[in-house]
Amino acid sequence: MNAAHPDPRIRILDEETVNQIAAGEVVERPASVVKELVENAIDAGAATVRIEIISGGGGIERMRIVDDGTGMSRENVRLAFLRHATSKLRAIDDLHRIRSMGFRGEALASIAAVARVEVVTKPRGSGAVPATRLVISGGEIVEDEETGAPDGTSVAVEDLFFNTPARKKFLKSTQTEVRHMYAIMEQIALAHPDLSFRLLHNGRERIATQTKGTLLDTISTLYGSDLARDLIPVDGRTAYMQVEGLIAAPAHTRPNTAQILISVNRRQISSATLARAVREGYGTLLPKDRFPVAFLSLTIDTGLVDVNVHPTKREVRISREADVVREIASVIRETLRSARLIPQASSPPVPGHAPVPESGYTPSAGAWQVAAPVRAYHPVHREQSATDTQLRLTENTADETAETEQPGMEVIGQLDAAYIMVTSSSGDHEELILVDQHAAHERVLYEQVRAKRERGVRSQELLVPVILTLRPKEAAAVREALPLLLAEGFVLEEFGRDSFAVRTVPVVLGKQVEPEVIDDIIADVIGDELRSAANKKEGITCIIACRGAIKAGVHMTREQMARLLSQLFRTDNPSTCPHGRPTMVSFPRERLDGMFRRT
Ligand code: ADP
Ligand code: MG
């Protein structure tokens, strides 16, 4: 924790302090063990931390965390496994100043209570003094001896939950557990780019960051240089805090907030409120339903941050949160503004040649150069042919002579590239109808995907396979979801380390799917929502329908709008999208009269 006090004394917290500490389950799953032990290594001032995971037929068999931190004296290590034994907190008032990851003195005790733990530790710089080796099983010290070892600490945990069979039963598959470990290690590595973390799973290195690295190095190691190249540095100071980090150019978008990573005083936290603040800073640079990629480190006066609210410290309480939210949004907005994201005017399309206009931004301070295509500036004719393809795929093939016009309905225009305006007359009544183009096409696709499944899923090969380059955590999730994806018509093949080639997709998506659509589908399939969904097949059908459907923001021709309407009215349930939202809203004459107070 601090180099000034190598191996500070461990004491047992008094009862009053204990009672004021957020209690709860620290060891929820194997990944919590990794988190707690790695945080202890960081608190012990380690420069390098190695995480070794061994799994086999019996699940996660062994986790070992090795650090080069302060180590512990024999006296200290014997205390460390007692409940509420900590060197980081003396009294509850210290909490306002706490900078260490830990402070409750519960982790080692909780882990040792439900596993078999072997710790070998030697105080840093103690020279020839022997190291101590303890073995603790179910909370009892069963071996205690002197041994030889390098400075630092290694803690190995085996047989997790051996004496709590009920919890053992609730463990998820090895892949799921390993995925949680990757996720936690990614977050910790991003919050501590200056430390080196190496994670080995069954001897294979999965994550490796460097000592003295920068945030950019860490991002580049974890997510690849493509993303690293498009990052904009953030460095803002506001009344209450400092906001530092890197945010991605708006060309990088995600369907959810999973890629907005935030640490508060170097503690990685999960906060929907802060993630929303970051999204708000991007404003209209992103399509409505998309989220940015951002890595932010907030330094806030420790007196304003209460870390004592959640047993695993995933959440913190920030005083003046409303100010903090506003300031984050404004720092992001300013950063993007001074990065001068200037879309270059697209030249008129040359026949037979589809230009891809580039939107480059000229950075204010040097190092970043981005030239990524921004979808919003695609020439309209490209958009139209893509829409044609999408509509052709959902045309009812059994009914080839189908009229594109819906009898009695007339398309009068499109509002804000999102709503189709229609008049409909029946008898002597006429009404105005607004149709949500995305929701409408989603309904059409949804019924088709479902009907196809009943007749046996048909899939087709893509003209060009789409390559997904994933992070270890995502790759593990995709591996886990392979059977589910296959059942839906997606054929994915492993393609090098953590990459997959998508060769085959369900027929409704067509032969030339935008890679972004596939990306989004996979992101949703491995996302939390589907994982917790009761009916996975239904969930995946909704995902395909939603991601494959025409989006808001797409300009359509009158003919395309008419085709979409006629497809919509052939579905069993034209008035709502699969999520239950309306596809259309009507304004009958009487309602308009009422609105105009004409009675
Ligand atoms: P906490 O981290 O909340 O203090 P723990 O149960 O995780 O509680 O650890 C208890 C104590 O053991 C710590 O306060 C620290 O003094 C010592 N300790 C734990 N892990 C290490 C380590 N890797 N290196 C040095 N000391 C450690
Ligand atoms: Mg701890």
Image (tube, rainbow, N blue to C red):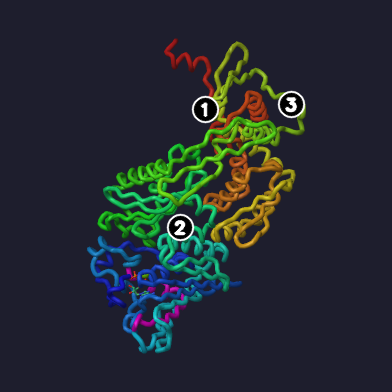
Label 2 or label 3, whichever lies nearer to me, is: 2
Q: Quadrant of the N terminus?
A: bottom left
Q: Nearer the viewer, residue 309 or 235?
A: 235
Q: Position of residue 31 (x, y in %)?
A: 48, 66
Q: Is residue 53 above or below residue 228?
A: below
User: Which quadrant holds residue 194?
Assistant: bottom left
Mark 2 residue crowding within 10 angstroms, few (<14) / some (14–19) / many (20+): many
Residue at image x 26%, y 62%? 97
Whichever of callouts 2 and 1 sits on the residue coming sooner in the sequence is 2
* Amino acid beneath label 3: Ala
Q: Secondary structure at mark 1?
A: loop
Q: Is residue 314 visible?
A: yes
- Quadrant containing the C terminus is top left
Cα–Cα gap, marks 2 and 1 = 39 Å
The numbered mark at residue 216 is 2
Element at label 2: helix
Magenta segment boundaries in residue numbering:
104-125
Q: Which mark is residue 166?
A: none
Which quarter holds ligand 2? bottom left
Circle 3: element type? loop
Give the side of residue 258 with respect to residue 413, left or right.
left
Return the residue at label 3.
Answer: 402
Whether the magenta-drawn stretch holds residue 580 is answered as no
Residue 582 in the image, given as x and y percentages of width and height: 54, 31
Q: Amino acid at mark 1?
A: Asp
- How far apart marks 3 and 1 lie (CA) works out to 28 Å
Please rate how many residues cluster around mark 1, counting C-alpha atoms within 10 Å: few if below 14, some from 14 to 19, many from 20: few
Q: Residue at x 62, y 40 (%)?
A: 548
